[in-house]
Image: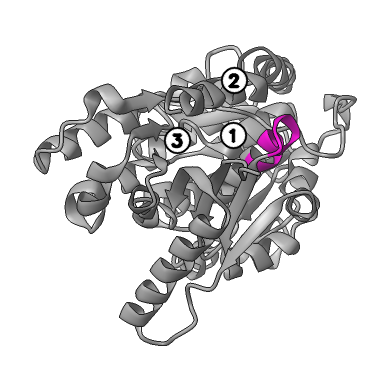
Amino acid sequence: MKKENNIAIFTMGRSLSGAEKRFIRIASELNKKRDNIILILNRRLYNKGLEDKEISDRLKNLKIILINNEKYSNRFRNMLYTFISVYLALKKNNVSLLHGSLGGLKYAFIGKILKAKTVGEITSPDVAEKISTTNLRYVIPFLDKLITVSPGVKQRTIENLEKIKKHKINQIYCSSIPFFLPQESYSTIEFSKKEKLIVFASRFIKRKNPLLFANVVKKILDEDPEWKVAILGQGPLEEEVKCILKDHLDKKRVVVEYTKDLYGYLKRSKLFVSLIYPDNYPSQSILEAMYMKNAIVATDVGNTNKLVTKDNGYLVKDYEVNSVYETLKEAVSNQERLEEMGEQSAKLIEEKFSKDIYLKELQAIYKSLE
């Protein structure tokens, strides 16, 4: 009896951030529609997933292959061990299509060795830049299809492919963005019960601008004693953020922490701020904030206007403290307008970011490669 061909979703990472969660959710939702889905994860990411209730519940219902990509202290030995482990896993499980992303992207070419079709996902501008500056330049030519998460990332991908003279423009697809509903229903959220709370949720790295945000909200908090701020995440700039806001941290008006319960904060907050460079689209955190009826303040760059319009938020023209401050000051001064924007945010999620649209597109890509 001939074994069924399987589709493997392959992602690896050191932390459980929005992009990592997204691929676990994609595998989980595909698994509900077809019975040939396998999820391949590195052990560290799997263990992080078990600490998150939603992700842990999704993992329980998936066929999972774990890769130990940190077995040795030597980087080269780890890469070789990972290569062999992935090769054997794909062969044993009769994988006919491999969809690689994040840390799994550079190993996606292994599928071609086994004559499987290969899809690579470019999840951010940073990954697009690595196409011409890292070993990805040797991987990309082996892939049958590239999926990019936004028009901006697609353009950067094309530019970097041209730098290495690998023209795959006809093989690049820009996907829609899915929003996966949380397990707990928040459809009955009442804005009147929300607090005067501003949330910023991101990795604390330069491109996400946590220091800019810290300097802005310091001014807001100095002037308005009623508002509080939650800065949620982790990263190399954490201590600098805390230093800027030390006085307000001491007064318990600011929290700076990593949380596994972002929805718990978004349920209480009225405003969500995103200052990502060079594009806030397709931030999963913004989508989650919109679902939780938050008004959005974001920099007007890239395709951010696909998420934020004058109806559900404020767009900031540049990355200057005064510009962001003036916009945020306007936002916190009009409670009635914030409520209208919060309601509109939730409406946009329902109308434009259905997971079913994305899953239909993704399955069409898979079918085109059969």
Examine the rendered structure and indicate whether residue 253 appears above or below residue 281: below
Residue at 70% x, 32% y is 34
Circle 3 residue: 324
For marks 1 and 3, the one nearer the N-term is 1
Residue 44 visible in this rendered orientation of the protein: yes
Residues rendered magenta in the picture: 27-35
Q: Position of residue 329 (x, y in %)?
A: 56, 32
- As helix, strand or loop, the secondary structure at mark 1 comes to helix
Examine the rendered structure and indicate whether residue 175 appears above or below residue 257: above
Asked if the stretch drawn in magenta spans residue 334, the answer is no
Residue 12 visible in this rendered orientation of the protein: no
Q: Who is closer to the viewer here, 128 or 99? A: 99
- Specify the principal SS of the magenta part: helix
Circle 1 residue: 286
Q: How many residues crowd mark 2 within 10 Å: few (<14), some (14–19), many (20+)?
A: few
Using the image, tell me which numbered label, if any, was put on residue 33: none
- As helix, strand or loop, the secondary structure at mark 2 comes to helix
Circle 2 residue: 360
For marks 2 and 3, the one nearer the N-term is 3
The quadrant in which residue 317 appears is top left
Q: Amino acid at mark 1?
A: Ile
